[in-house]
Amino acid sequence: MVKQHWVVTGGLGFIGSAFVRVVLAERPDVSITVLDAMTYAGNPANLAAIAGDPRYRFVKGDIADAKAVDAAIGEGCDAIVNFAAETHVDRSILDPEAFIRTDVMGTHVLLEAVRRHQVTRFLQVSTDEVYGDVETGESTESDPIRPRSPYAASKAGGDLQVLAYHTTFGTPVLITRGSNTYGPYQYPEKLIPLFVTNLLEGEQVPVYGDGLQIRDWLYADDHARGIAHVLERGTPGEVYNLGGGNSRTNLEITKELIRLTGRTFEASVRHVTDRAGHDRRYALDCAKARALGWSPRTNFAVGLAETVNWYRDHEDWWRPIKSGEFREYYQRQYALR
């Protein structure tokens, strides 16, 4: 019997769709309405497997449009989980304004809807990038935020609004800050799906600078379960870091993807000019989320191999994407580097 109605914004995207699939599979008492503007990364194919589930409803709309948000909430909802965001650092450098509109203004519209409809929980899905470059140690939730890209700054702006609404209005908010996420259904502008699909096509992969930037990797379903866990068990007004505990350099990831796709390093790698203001290292202290009862389940080597196999077996999903708008973006981003 359905007891809870959750609105999931950005549910056609990578992590959002993983969240919807996991929740509907593991929580029979929850129904979900997805609100998604269906921009380039919002793909209906990501939720094709659950499209016929009676607990699933879709509303096309922008989180910056209050009427669309009201339509998604309908007669009421118990929680809003906000995945909707412009997310790619490279695109934020090319077009910062779009990030401010969605990540800052859109978050504001959602927070006002929470107040207007008396929603009992609002969870903002954020990123470890708001902490900025971490030379040593690990970022804790109480550390100051020091975003260094337009993307990270827009996400930080949303986070600050969320926390301010809790202090000022008592809005029941939560924030999760996740590390780099990987897995099936990820739009191929990000490192792992871009490199895997390039390698499967026999193309080279563009490695920024020396490739020694360090990121922590978290499997998409583990990230989704962490968000659901915080939504149900977290303390309003608090921030929770969600990391995979799998720190690797980009070059290490590249070499492993080359091995898994049967290519050779010399023929596959093209070093390109590094990203402007590229953060060298991110690292999260996740003790707070672990104390709440969450921990990732997926071994990184296993998860990465399964991810490569998924892209190998689902060319019908990614080949149409890597044309049109994506091809234009790819040429704009890498051709002169």
Image (spheres, grey):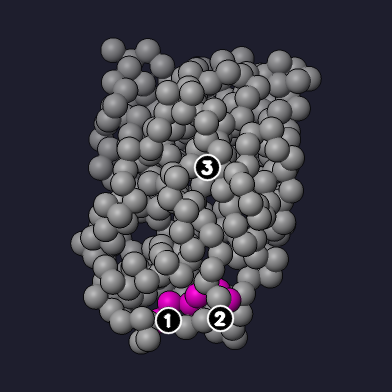
Q: Which residue is mark 2?
A: 272
Contact, CB < 8 Å: mark 1 with mark 2? no
Left or right: 291 as drawn, with respect to 136: left
**Circles 3 and 1: CB distance less than 8 Å?**
no
Q: Is residue 328 above or below residue 85?
A: below
Residue 281: give x, y in percent of width and height.
Answer: 60, 57
Range shown magenta: 203-209
Residue shown at the point (76%, 20%) measured from the top left: 167
Residue 84 lies in what quarter of the image?
top right
Mark 3, residue position: 178
Picture quadrant of residue 5: top left
Q: Secondary structure at mark 1?
A: strand
Instruction: For residue 104, say whether it is visible.
Output: no
Q: Give above or below for 219 relative to 88.
A: above
Residue plotted at (43% across, 39% down): 223
Q: Earlier in the sequence, mark 3 or mark 2?
A: 3
Q: Amino acid at mark 3?
A: Gly
Q: Is residue 264 visible?
A: yes
Q: Quadrant of the N terminus?
A: top left
- Which amino acid is tagged 1? Val
Task: Identify residue for label 1.
Answer: 269
Whether 206 is among the magenta residues is yes
**Residue shown at 38%/46% (left/top)?**
219
- Mark closer to the chain start, 3 or 1: 3
Give the answer, above or below, for where 65 lies relative to 23: below
Q: Helix, strand or loop at disc 2? A: strand
Side of 175 relative to 159 (left or right)? left
Sort mark 2 into few (<14), some (14-19) or many (20+) by Cα contacts within 10 Å: some
Name the residue nearer the viewer: 225 or 20: 225
